[in-house]
Image (cartoon, rainbow, N blue to C red):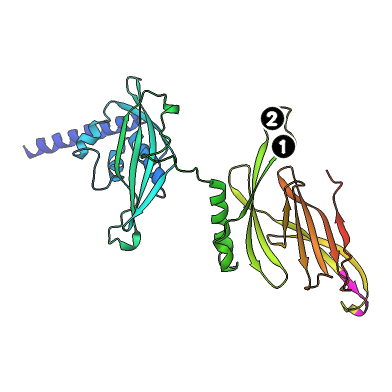
Amino acid sequence: MKRIFLAAVALFSLATIRQAALAAEDTPEVPYVDDRSSADAVVRSLYSAINRHEFARAWGYYGDTKPAKDFDTFVKGYDGTEKVDVETGDVSDEGAAGSIYYSVPVAIRATGKDGKEAVFAGCYTLRQVSAQVQAPPFQPIFIDKGALKPSKADFEEALPASCGDGPPPPKKDTALEQAKKAFLATYGDQCDKQFLGEEPNAFSIKYKDKDAAEGDPDKETRLFEFYCSAAAYNTASVYYMTDALGGVLQLQFAEPELDIRYENNDSDGKLLGVTVTGFHTTGWATNPEYDEETRTIRTFNKWRGVGDASDSGTYLFRDGNFSLVQYDVDASYDGEENPQTVVDYNTAP
């Protein structure tokens, strides 16, 4: 009798495995997204789990307030659902007693196994409890509540502009935030503290690509200047610029390496000559000025306070980047400003 029972259990287990395998085959190949780094990322992770039929993972994105009376009811709610598309809008937030509450506009398009589509829209509220006040187990950002209602709008038009009664939150300047993050990560320990909290100077540069056909739209590059340090007679800035992929890169300035010769090898003696021996790049711009009309950045580095010895570079924006077109050097220390041009690419294409 015991053998018969064990055989029945084995057959049942094999049947269960086969059913699970068939279910896995029916599960659509959708990306696995499990991102708790922001409120909207949590919402997208929720629907990644639902699309992959990973309902325990989906259930886990909620806090104490669950979306159904129990887990089985939650799962049954998606019995007839083939897939769910999701869009999220601009997130707003509000702090309260050790927590941050996020409001996320959401629109979804649920496609049934019969091919029919239904659109829902509304808002999710998510909560982030300060990590400093938590005891184990740690709770990352979680969904506190959600309220999506049927929408008659097309999916592409259904996303709410904002959550709540107030005006839509201002759109975040993603490029600016990326530039700030990059600047602080690289120069937070190098620059004067007084400048770290300041907003950078921001410029928009619209241009035509060199290979653009007639009628092609303009491209746009954002340029950000961060003040870094101030000494007796020189200030230093760092520039970031948006790239073609939507990220930001620090601007690098080409500078010539110089062989400067004086009579008697003394800088107080007569200047004999200045020779360019090579080039290097630097991320620092000394006493820079950006001219929006000519699209040039000019640097000016004083070698001493009176300014009778210096070097300066002119960098022109073309073909989507800044390049060196002129470099001047005044190495005379003679009490007068009389620079000489040692690099001239002004006629270069």
Q: Nearer the viewer, residue 103 or 46?
A: 103
Mark 1 and mark 2 residues within 8 Å of each other at the beta carbon: yes
Magenta residues: mostly which secondary structure?
Answer: strand
Please tell me which residue is depicted at 45% across the width and 43% down the height of the picture.
Answer: 169
Membership of 263 in magenta stretch: yes
- Assign the C terminus to one quadrant of the image: top right
Q: Is residue 341 magenta?
A: no
Counting from the top left corner in percent of width and height, residue 168 is at: 44, 40
Would you say 96 lies left or right of 244 here?
left
Q: Is residue 127 above or below residue 87?
A: below
Quadrant into which the N terminus falls: top left
Q: Residues within 10 Å of mark 2 (few under 14, many from 20)?
A: few
Tell me the tag on residue 288.
Answer: none
* Residue range of the region highlighted in magenta in the rendering: 260-264
The percent position of residue 338, horizontal first and vertical second, equals 89, 65
Pick whichever, 233 or 118, lies toward us: 233
On the image, numbered disc 1 is attached to which residue? 209
In screen coordinates, is 235 left or right of 310? left
Looking at the picture, which amino acid does disc 1 mark? Asp
What x and y, as percent, mark residue 155? 42, 27
Q: Residue at x 56, y 63 (%)?
A: 196
Density class for disc 1 (Cα within 10 Å; few <14, some 14-19, many ≥20) is: some
Residue 216 — which label? 2
The alpha-carbon separation of the residues under discs 1 and 2 comes to 9 Å
* Element type at mark 1: loop
Q: Write the residue at 58% across / 58% down.
A: 183
Q: Earlier in the sequence, mark 1 or mark 2?
A: 1
Q: Residue at x 73, y 49 (%)?
A: 322
| Residue type of the residue flagged with mark 2 | Asp
